[in-house]
Image (cartoon, rainbow, N blue to C red):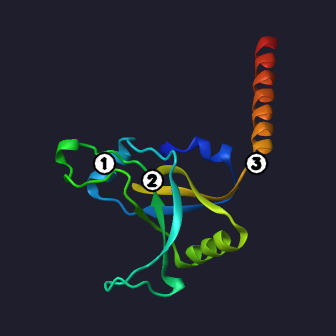
Amino acid sequence: MAILAENRRARFDYEILETFEAGIELRGFEVKAVKSGRVNLAGSFALPRAHSTSSGQATSRGDAEIWLLNCDIPPYQPKNTPHDYDPKRSRRLLLKKAEIKYLLGSITSRGLRLIPIKIYTKNNRIKLELGLGKAKRQIDKRESLKKKEIKREIARNLKKIR
């Protein structure tokens, strides 16, 4: 399992309660770009949207889909990509229906958010790790910075002793 991109800010800004593995619906040239590490998860997020039929009308709530928004995948070869390609286009995430229903319930009832944590390969497929979490308050962020600084100080002192 090779990690291709990671959203380090996600664990700082959000308290991750659960994680889910999802596939991403990509085009061929996007797959090459992601596998070469040309992807940016900073500022991206996932939202549920109602599935629309060919007539353009949304169907029942059970047909909702989860979409990845604002994920930047620049073209692998800029001259060989379609001229109307948008690097920050919305991409559908591939999850099981039961997972989608659970996520919809968690988002609406408990006020949680879906945050992309990392993109990696698994069995030669590109997967996205989604975190279900709630936003940290400013006080919690300060506490996590203090803990991080204490760990660094302990590591420095241990290094001096050896």
**Which residue is the site of mark 2?**
70
Question: x, y (%) of residue 49?
Answer: 49, 73
Task: Please give left or right for residue 72 compared with residue 139 in the image.
Answer: left
Which amino acid, by three-letter code, is at mark 1? Lys
Sequence-first disc among 1 and 3: 1
Question: x, y (%) of residue 16?
Answer: 69, 54
Q: Residue at x 60, y 74 (%)?
A: 104
Q: Residue at x 67, y 43 (%)?
A: 12
Q: Is residue 123 visible?
A: no
**Which residue is the site of mark 1?**
32
Question: x, y (%) of residue 131?
Answer: 62, 57
Q: Is residue 35 visible?
A: yes
Sequence-first disc among 3 and 2: 2
Q: Secondary structure at mark 3?
A: loop
Gap in Å between the C-alphas at discs 1 and 2? 19 Å
Task: Please give left or right for residue 116 compared with residue 12 in the image.
Answer: left
Q: Which mark is residue 137?
A: 3
Judge whether 41 appears above or below 156 on screen. Answer: below
Q: Secondary structure at mark 1?
A: helix
Q: Are marks 3 and 2 in contact (CB under 8 Å)?
A: no
Question: x, y (%) of residue 70?
Answer: 45, 53
Which amino acid, by three-letter code, is at mark 3? Arg
Kindly report which numbered mark, 1 or 3, lies closer to the viewer in this rendering.
3
Kindly report which numbered mark, 1 or 2, lies closer to the viewer in this rendering.
2
Q: Secondary structure at mark 2?
A: loop
User: Toward the viewer: 65 or 20?
Assistant: 65
